[in-house]
Structures are given as C-alpha cells and as structure tokens.
Amino acid sequence: MDTLCSLYNDALACRAPTKNYALFLMERYLQLKIKAIKAGAPIQINTLDDFINYCKHYGVKVQRLLCEFYLHILVLDHETELNPGPFVGDIQLQAFISFGVNQIKWPKAYNAFQRQENGLDLWIRAEPSDPVQLWRKHRTLMKIPGVIEAFRSMHEATIRQGLEYFFSVKDPAIDAAKFRCQISNPNIQLKEPFKYENFKLAANCLHLYGEVILRAGPSWLGYRFRSPIIWHPSPAYQALYEMPEGHTGHFFEHLVMHHRYRPPHEIPSPAYSLTALHVNYNVLMRARKRVSRGVCGVLKKVCFW
C-alpha cells in the first residue's frame, strides 16, 4: 500500500493540476481516501453519524475538508433531512477555510509539476559495455539448428503487425502530437526533441525502417543506441549525418550495409541527453542564421556603395 500511495503521488507530479476547482476538490477527496486506506482506517461515509465520527477522529484540518466535501455534495449526496452543522461549528465557515487552504495547495502542486516538466531530460541509454561480445553471442545463438526458423516467423509477425497497427493510428497520432505541441509553452517547444514536425516525418518514413529490419531478419541485432534510428533523418538531425534532402531511402540502405553490427574498433557510446542534443542543434542553427544575415547585410552594403 505504501508503494501504491507513493506511485500515485509520483503520477500526480507528472501532470499539471486542474484549473477547474470542482475537479481539484474531487482529487483532494480521493487523496484523503487513499491516505486513510494507507493508515488502515478506510473512510466510508454512508450516514451522518459516519460523517460526524470522522470529523472527530481526524481532527480540525480534515474536518474542514470534509465540510467542504459535504457542502458540495461529494459525500452524503442524498442527505436532506439532518444537519451536521452544530457538531462541526458551522459547515459554510469550515468549508470556506478549507477552500482557502486548497488555494495554497494548488500552486504547490503546480510548482512540483513545473519542476518536472522544465527539468526532466530525455536520455538515450548507453550502449553495451562490450558490443563485440554481444554480437558474438548473438551469432552463436543464430547458429543453433532451428533457431533461425523459430525467430524468423516471430520476428516477421511482430514487425508486420506493429507496422500495420501504427499506420492504422498514424493520422490521429500526428494530429494529437500537433495539438500537444501547439498548447505547450515555448520553453518546452524549444527543448522537445520529438516535436511534431520530426514525428510526422519519422512516421512517414517508418515503412523504410520496417523494410530494413524485415530484410535483415533475425540477424538484425537492433542494439545500436548511438542515435534513435527511426527518427533519422529529420531536419533537426540531418546535420549529424551530413545528409541532403531527399536521401532518406539511401540512408536506410546505408544502415543495412554498414551499421547492422558495431565494428570492433569503435568505442561504445555512453548515455547522452537527446534533449540537450536538440537544444544545442537549435542554438547552432540560430547562430548560423545570424551569421548568414550578417554576411548578407555586408554584401548589400558593398553592392550599394
């Protein structure tokens, strides 16, 4: 239960708190019930006596919160005959104080989310410490009689089914990615490596990647994390490969011929921040544009004189 509560709190920190106070209040009610379960005393308010007893048991802070739940019909929604007011001082006063406290809790939740959103980086894992050894084990496994045949059918079925499913949801996924990009703040747009434009281009090129690994069959090791292959080539990453526009197909052919396995002499790459790579690329492109504009300005002046 402790693990479950911790995971719930971590999940809340990964999203912005709602600006709709009714929904925020409902969330507070669910949090209270989870904490009560964790403490071994679940809250079940079915009668007015239950409400009064919980107000007494949990103290004034929870009492005020319960009064707000009661006032806004989150508990005892069918109770219209009895009045718990005298037992808690005054329902409206307590609920109003609870509302004020919740205003303080909202920015705390929002700041926790902002720290996550603005500070969490996107990483590419490090390659195996000994890629050659991994390759040798893979080759040894493939030489066992019957392994190739068993893997081939599973490999092809998995890849084809994955491609078929993705292309069935591609258009709504691209639309959703565009919407997410449009409503995100400029800071996120600057740092987002898998932005809408890159995703759209990668989605349209995915069939090429599928063809590569289908042709390679079970011999495809698929353990090359130096760069996220599926996302290449896109305008934000083409500089890494010095590849001109319109050469996507040749790029994937190059992968098949030269990058199925790691050459023994290459040093495995460590984990790196894809977000930082993207930001650095954007900075480089802006610097180049400034230099280009400066050169053009100089040329205009020379031509004018």
Image (cartoon, grey):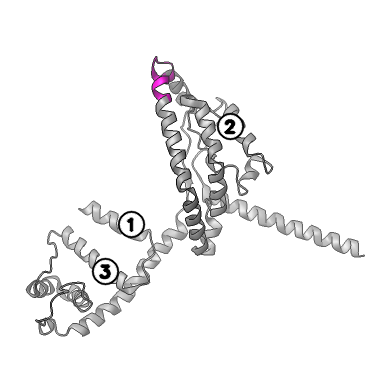
Residue in the image at 53% along x and 40% along y = 206
Residue at numbered disc 3:
26
Question: Of the residues shown, which amino acid type is indicated by label 3?
Answer: Met
Q: Secondary structure at mark 2?
A: helix
Q: Secondary structure at mark 3?
A: helix
| Dot placed on the residue nearer the N-terminal end, 3 or 2 | 3
Q: Is residue 227 left or right of residue 91?
A: right
Mark 2, other Cα within 10 Å: few <14 / some 14–19 / many ≥20 = some
Magenta stretch, residue numbers: 141-152
Residue situated in front as seen by the camera: 253 or 164: 164
In which quadrant will I find the C terminus? bottom right
Mark 1, other Cα within 10 Å: few <14 / some 14–19 / many ≥20 = few
Q: Secondary structure at mark 1?
A: helix
Give yes or no for residue 146 being in the magenta stretch: yes
Residue at numbered disc 1:
11
Residue in the image at 17% along x and 63% along y = 36
Residue 192 visible in the shown view: yes
Residue situated in front as seen by the camera: 296 or 48: 48
Residue at numbered disc 2:
255
- Real-space CA distance between mark 2 and mark 1, rounded to the nearest whole angstrom: 38 Å
- Real-space CA distance between mark 3 and mark 1, rounded to the nearest whole angstrom: 16 Å
